[in-house]
């Protein structure tokens, strides 16, 4: 029953101490979710990239995954989604329109409580 703000790129650490997660990129929240839900089905490509970069015992000796490119200059953010220059799923709309943080739902339309994503293609991210 305590509030805590933990700022880290290491989502492996977060799993042990948090109930809810807000993932930020370039100063904006890009995804929110209960901790276990975000690990099972991330709804934003940046979140997926962070999760993929966690070292795993079953991949010992293999090259670690890293999100390609560099974080943006906060004084000159890219147009559209700030993550679009580094995103493997980016399309034209990502380069022109800033995605709003919206509720995430199951394929049948039922809302996933506490889940939000600021990605034009969150459905493809979460539902594969």
Image (cartoon, grey):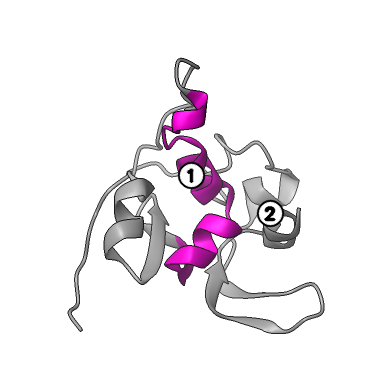
Tell which of 6 and 16 is nearer to you: 16
Q: Which mark is residue 118?
A: none
Tell which of 64 and 116 is nearer to you: 64
Label 2 neighbour load within 10 Å: few <14, some 14-19, many 20+: some
Q: Quadrant of residue 16?
A: bottom left
Look at mark 2 in the image and give the residue it sits on: 125
Q: Nearer the viewer, mark 2 or mark 1?
A: 1
Query: Does residue 68 appear in this view?
Result: no
Q: Position of residue 12 (x, y in %)?
A: 36, 47
Q: Position of residue 32 (x, y in %)?
A: 46, 68
- Whether residue 81 sits left or right of residue 127 in the image: it is left
Against 99, residue 13 (above or below) is above
Look at mark 1 in the image and give the residue it sits on: 51
In contact (CB < 8 Å): disc 2 and disc 1: no
Is disc 2 placed on a helix, strand or loop?
helix
Is disc 1 placed on a helix, strand or loop?
helix
What residue is rendered at 51% in x and 29% in y? 58
Q: How many marks?
A: 2
Q: Quadrant of residue 92?
A: top right
Residue lying furthest right: 108
Label 1 neighbour load within 10 Å: few <14, some 14-19, many 20+: some
Q: Earlier in the sequence, mark 2 or mark 1?
A: 1
Query: Does residue 123 appear in this view?
Result: yes
Q: Which residues are magenta?
A: 30-59
Q: Is residue 48 magenta?
A: yes
- Report how far apart the C-alphas of labels 2 and 1 lie in the structure: 13 Å
Tell which of 127 and 88 is nearer to you: 127
């Amino acid at each position: 029953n305590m509030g805590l703000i933990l700022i880290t790129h290491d989502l492996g650490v977060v799993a042990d101490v948090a109930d809810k997660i807000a993932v930020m990129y370039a100063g904006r929240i890009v995804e929110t979710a209960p901790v276990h839900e975000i690990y099972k089905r991330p709804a934003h490509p940046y979140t997926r990239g962070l999760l993929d970069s966690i070292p795993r015992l079953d991949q010992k000796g293999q090259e670690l995954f890293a999100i390609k490119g560099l974080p943006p200059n906060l004084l000159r953010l890219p147009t559209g989604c700030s993550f679009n220059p580094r995103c493997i799923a980016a399309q034209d709309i990502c380069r022109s329109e800033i995605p709003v943080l919206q509720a995430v739902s199951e394929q049948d339309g039922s809302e996933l409580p506490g889940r939000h994503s600021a990605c034009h293609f969150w459905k493809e991210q979460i539902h594969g």
